[in-house]
Amino acid sequence: MGIETIILFVTLALWVAGFHLRSRLRPCAATRPLHSQPTASVIIPARNEAHNLPTLLRSLAAQPLKAHEILVVDDGSTDRTAELARELGAAVIASQPLPEGWRGKTWACHQGAQVATGGLLLFVDADAWFEPDGFARILSGYGGGACSVGPYHAVRKPYEDLSLFFNFNMTVGTVPNGLFGQMLLVDRESYRGVGGHEAVKSRVLENLLLAAQFRSAGIPVQSGTGRGMFSFRMYPNGLRELIAGWTKGFAAGAGQTPRGTLLLVVAWMFGLMFAPLGWLVTGDAMRWGAIYLLCAAQVGWFSRQVGDFRWYTALLYPLPLIFFFVIFAWSAARSGKRVTWKGREIRAD
């Protein structure tokens, strides 16, 4: 058996192994009737989110099940964030000056939690929104402790397709026992029991550290995908913002992925690269071309579980995959250094 045949079989084996990741792309399931749910306070940290906030607030207003209260914590915005929030029915909390050792988002969430009066605290990023009846479906899936739903990625411009493997890795690395950064649903007692956002006040990836805090305290943590319930659009202001956003902590976040899952994902992605390389090196379009199409079909299927990525992105998957490898390496190199995000210098996790 020649070396080419061995690599071909290895590639096929890694392609098959990739299907084991499908179980980590599952949605949260309903666990209890809504009438047994306590009231939920929605807390939205917002810094210069005038372009995003109306979509989120209008989606909440359109929900059949209403939130107990909606609190927007205005984190020193210089645009119309606070004004729009009030116009759309939210209560606005003007953030106090950022204390030493805190990050803007964690400080805003902390202040919102101090004011909230609901039995549940639902922290939501301003660039996300709820799909029709999504709020009720998420609450019906809440089984106690800390819960998070991974938002479905709404892709609008071609450059946003470059986020494909970042979104996929973020999802399979979080479900079912981690927390997504875009949403946290938790009961007040559990939140206070681990020290809330004060316990992770300086961290960019506060969701990963909070999940560890909850688990250490014996508080259950659950998560699932949010297709049809909860959506977001990442980095709509251009490629530069997308690169900066994924650079600020993605490599450190990958380090928190369960070891077995991380090894499987890495092996699977390298297997994806063998297909175009084998085709390019051997010129054997019959065998390597067929394997390449199998890989593209698998990537396309996986990608639709986490976002509405275009069909040609899967067909041309080596491009977003190479982009992923480059930005991941850059993120690892920048870990622990100062980076600029939303007008502030922060230390990358």
Image: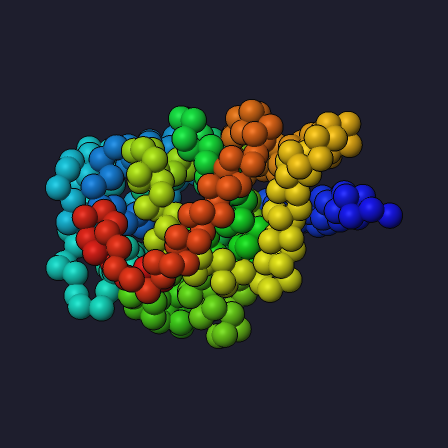
Q: Name the residue nearer the viewer: 196 or 281.
A: 281
Q: Residue at (39%, 52%) from the top-left corner?
A: 330
Q: Is residue 292 above or below residue 67?
A: above
| Percent coordinates x, y for residue 302 in the rendering | 62, 38
User: Left or right of 233: which side holds 299?
Assistant: right
**Which image quarter: residue 50?**
top left
> Residue 335 appears at what percent x and percent y?
36, 61
User: Residue 88, located in which quarter of the rendered image?
Assistant: top left
Name the residue located 60 percent from the left edge and 64 percent from the top edge.
259
Front residue (pair 91, 214): 214
The picture places residue 273, in percent across and down from the top left corner, at 62, 42
Above or below for 195 versus 345: below
Residue 84 visible from this viewpoint: yes
Q: Is residue 114 above or below residue 73?
A: below
Q: Is residue 37 visible?
A: no
Residue 121 appears left or right of 86 = right
* Residue at (87% x, 48% y) in the render: 1
Quadrant position of the C terminus in the picture = bottom left
Q: Residue at x 23, y 47 (%)?
A: 342
Q: Position of residue 329 (x, y in %)?
A: 44, 53
Horizontal side of residue 151 vs 2, given as left or right: left
Q: Nearer the viewer, residue 16 or 288?
A: 288
Most extreme residue toward the right, as rendered? Answer: 1
Colour scheme shown: rainbow
